[in-house]
Image: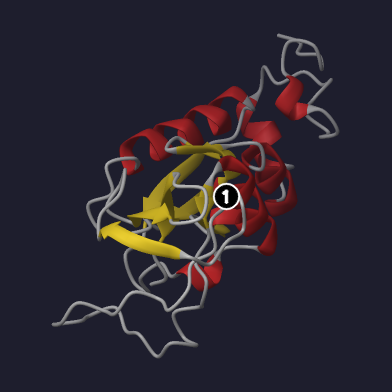
Amino acid sequence: MKFDALTQPHLEGLDLAKGDVSHPAQAQSNTTAEAIWAVLSPLTDPEIPVVSLRDMGILRDVRHVGAHWQVVITPTYSGCPAMDQIEDDVRQALLDSGHDAEVVTQLAPAWTTDWMTPQAHDQLRAYGIAPPCASATATHQHSLRFVRALAPTSVACPRCASTQTTEVSHFGSTACKALFKCLACLEPFDHFKPH
């Protein structure tokens, strides 16, 4: 079976893109971590479709284990409802590209907003979500907290950039975001909580 860039655009630029992948074992032996990363690069967060899983820091590692590959994913928080969809998307992208790889969910170390790239921050802001305003390590927050963390002193509105904002609810559209309201433009917006 032959694939071309029109029928498999996510394979463009890979050795497998125009080759015969009717022998998965042979394709598997020629696979590199870079090829796997290239296949996974276009995958986006199902809850925030403008940000890639890699830029969010959810895709943690691609490693060769024995005769197959493992792709390691870490949820933004334990119990994240998007993880089943993310795992399915990763697995399907790997299958579509002829890669025999296992998807492994790793909970430790816990995901932190420090793993988000600057590009993810920009994409969140452009999408109308205020990115985390301080890294978890900069605020000395830990994964386990027994008291509610104080809201950041100023969260800039992603629409008008005003810092005249207030937290309406500690939980927004998802548990990893808080709902804020801008006092300047009066628009509500989600703020990705630093953790």
Query: Looking at the image, is 113 positioned above or below residue 17?
Result: below
Query: Which residue is located at x 66 percent, y 23 percent?
Result: 23
Image location of residue 175, percent across then percent down:
27, 53
Quadrant showing the N terminus: top right
For this rendering, which residue is in front, 128 or 72? Answer: 128
Can you identify the residue that label 1 sits on? 124
Image location of residue 137, percent across then percent down:
46, 86
User: The disc labelled 1 sits on which kind of residue?
Assistant: Leu
Q: Is residue 120 toward the left or the right of residue 133 in the image?
A: right
Q: Is residue 112 toward the left or the right of residue 42 in the image?
A: left
Query: Which residue is located at x 86 percent, y 33 percent?
Result: 13
Q: Quadrant of residue 16?
A: top right
Judge the density around disc 1: few (<14), some (14-19), many (≥20) Cα neighbours within 10 Å: many
Q: Quadrant of residue 108?
A: bottom left
In what element is the residue under mark 1? helix
Image location of residue 58, percent across then percent down:
48, 55
Residue reaching furthest left?
Answer: 146
Query: Which residue is located at x 51 percent, y 77 percent?
Result: 134
Structure colour scheme: secondary structure
For this rendering, which residue is in front, 112 or 150? Answer: 150
Q: Is residue 17 toward the left or the right of residue 167 in the image?
A: right
Total numbered badges shown on the rendered structure = 1
Q: Can residue 115 be seen in this snapshot?
A: yes
Query: Looking at the image, is 32 positioned above or below residue 151?
Result: above
Q: Is residue 190 toward the left or the right of residue 167 in the image?
A: right
Quadrant showing the C terminus: bottom left
Q: Can residue 68 be seen in this snapshot?
A: no
Image location of residue 60, percent across then percent down:
52, 60
Query: Looking at the image, is 36 positioned above or below residue 85?
Result: below
